Every structure is written in structure tokens, then in C-alpha cells.
Amino acid sequence: MGGRPVGRFAPSHLTGLPPVSWLKLVLLGGSALVLSGQETIRVDVRLVSILATVKAPSGEPVGGLDKADFSVSDNGVAQEIAVFERRTEQPLSVALLIDTSSSTAIKLKQEVDSITRFLASLFGEGHPGDSAALFSFNDTVTLQTSFSNRLPRFVQALKTLQGEGGTSLYDAIVLLSHELERREGRKVAVVVTDGADTTSVRTFHEALEAVQMADAVLYGLLVVPIANDPGRSIGGEHTLQQLADSTGGRMFLPTLGAELDRAFSEILKDLRTQYYLAFYPRQVPLTKNPFHRLEVKVARPGLRVLARTGYYGEAEGSAKGATPSWRRGRR
């Protein structure tokens, strides 16, 4: 049996999306605005969450840092870290998105084998509350397995995958992000694709907006069916890299086999050494753009932080913030 089609996008509406009541921002505490001259300052709205991975110059993840080692700024203004967890125990929701378009069919079996090993490690070594969901996409997005930690369900679903059709990568990321937005705890998207979007209705910017709204970290694993440049989608690679960088994730360029297994192993290392930071925005200058720029730093020299570059919050002239473009017109 196949999975449940999540849907396709049509130009005038969204098909198969969760109700709007599921698409919400988590508001914690009150909200207040202070007017200072011509500038609008936000003093306290919602708890903004950040998952951060810290890397040594060797590329290995760094654990053992303290709250005092980190600093966070929102639109250039330093913020007080209200919540800090080292090697956070928050359960993981990992959404796996596998490209089943005709361009990846030749390597699909090897991808399935690596994904099976990744899931076995994820469920066997992590938090008992960790779960995953499996989505496939070509020109249609299909939920193969809803969130679960029962490995046999995934093994059975993976066996049914076949390569055919076009590649609606951006549509798939938007739909997957809606599903992740409903989840609590840490949220991660792992996308296995050749990077070439050919049939999406949604755009790259809408996909980026959606994954940011879901507070998810995205990892991109690029599978290149043809290794030479004429067989690759360089533009697709660049957009996948930008999606990963903007959410605090990473981009991998494996050629399947052992390289793909190593990429999944690196992702597991990151997930097991993540830091959780959160703050209530205070004294943040508002602009017409609802996207707030975040910067996370560590005081120790030589270390590099991977974290989301921003979040969608309030905009100038609107106490509730501007509505993201992919939500406008929804009922």
C-alpha cells in the first residue's frame, strides 16, 4: 500500500493542507509596544527558540559550553537568553523528504538503504520521545509514514518507493513545514534530492519562509545521479545550500554509498550535541519587514555557530506582525 497524498499546489489555492488553526505562532506571555519618537520598539512578545550547533575548526561538534559563552541579537539589539539547555533533551521530530522523481530513480535503492540505517540509529540511540515522518515527492507530495518511532513501518514504506515524474521540491518543503509546525520540541527536516526543481508552483522564497515559520532546521543531502557538471543542477544546489544555511542546518554533497551514510552520521552527531536557546524579544526596533535578523555568537575563539538566521515576528505598523506571503488569502 502506498502513502497518503499530502497534495499538490494549485495557483489559486492550497490542496491538502492542515486547517489554519494548526498554523499558529506560539504566544507566551503578553505583548506590548512602546513608541519612541518615530521608532516603534517591541518590548516583549513571544519566546523565540533557537537550536544551535557549535563546530570546532576540525568540523567536530563542540559540547560542554555554558550559557555565558553565547550571545544573541535580534535586529542588531542584544537579547537576554531566558532559556538555555546543553545537549537538550527535548524530543526530536525528524521529517524525512525523499525525492522520487524520475531523475533520481537510478540511485533510489541506495538512498533507501542509507535512510533505513539512519532511522535505526535515530530510534535506537536517542530520546524515547524522538519520532520521524517519511514524505516522498515527485510532482505530488505523499506522506508515506506519519510521525512514529516504529522502524518496521518505515522499512515497509521505503520498499514501495519508485522513481517517476517531475520534481516539486519547493512545494514539498512548504507542505512538510506545515506538518512540522504542528509539532512540539525540536524540529528537523532532512531532504534527500538531486536539487533540481522542475514542477513546483511555490517558489524558493515561499519554501524558505515556510521552513522558518516552522522553526525547523533543514539538512540537505544532495544526490547527484550524474557526477559531471552537465548532469547536475548547480542552481538547485545553491538554493538547497541557502535553505540549510538560513535555518542552521548543513548541506552535504554525497555520491551515495559510504558518503551518504557518513552524511547521515554527521547529522546524528549534530542532533545529539545541539544547544537550545530562547529569549523574549525586548527593545527590538521594528521595520516594515516582519523577518527579524538573528545573530548567535560564542565568545570562545575559533568556534563556529550554526543557527537560524532569523524568524518572522512583528513588523512596523502592526502589533500582530505582517502575514507571511504564503498565508495571505487563506481561510
Image: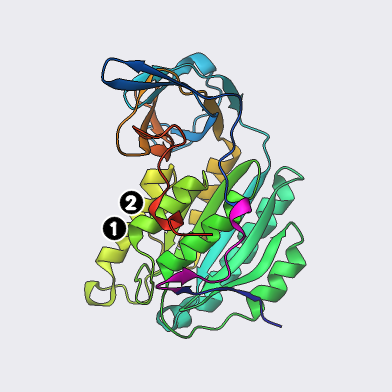
Q: How is the image coloured?
A: rainbow
Q: Residues within 10 Å of mark 2 (few under 14, many from 20)?
A: some
In the rendered view, tell whether residue 292 sits above or below residue 122.
Answer: above
State the residue at coordinates (60%, 26%): 86
Dot 1 amino acid type: His
* Closer-to-camera residue (225/331): 331
Residue 318, horizontal then vertical, whole percent: 40, 35
> Which residue shows up at 43% across the image and 40% down it?
312
At mark 2, the secondary structure is helix
Residue bearing the label numbered 2: 242
C-alpha separation, residue under disc 2 versus residue under disc 1: 6 Å
Q: Amino acid at mark 2?
A: Gln
The magenta span reads 10-21
Residue of label 1: 238
Q: Are marks 2 and 1 in contact (CB under 8 Å)?
A: yes
Q: Is residue 327 toward the left or the right of residue 64 in the image?
A: left
Q: Residues within 10 Å of mark 1 (few under 14, many from 20)?
A: few
Give the secondary structure at mark 1. helix
Q: Nearer the viewer, residue 183 or 90?
A: 183
* 324 vs 237, nearest the viewer: 324
Q: Quadrant of residue 4?
A: bottom right
Q: Is residue 164 visible?
A: yes
Q: x, y percentage for residue 232?
A: 28, 72
Q: Is residue 126 above or below residue 197?
A: above
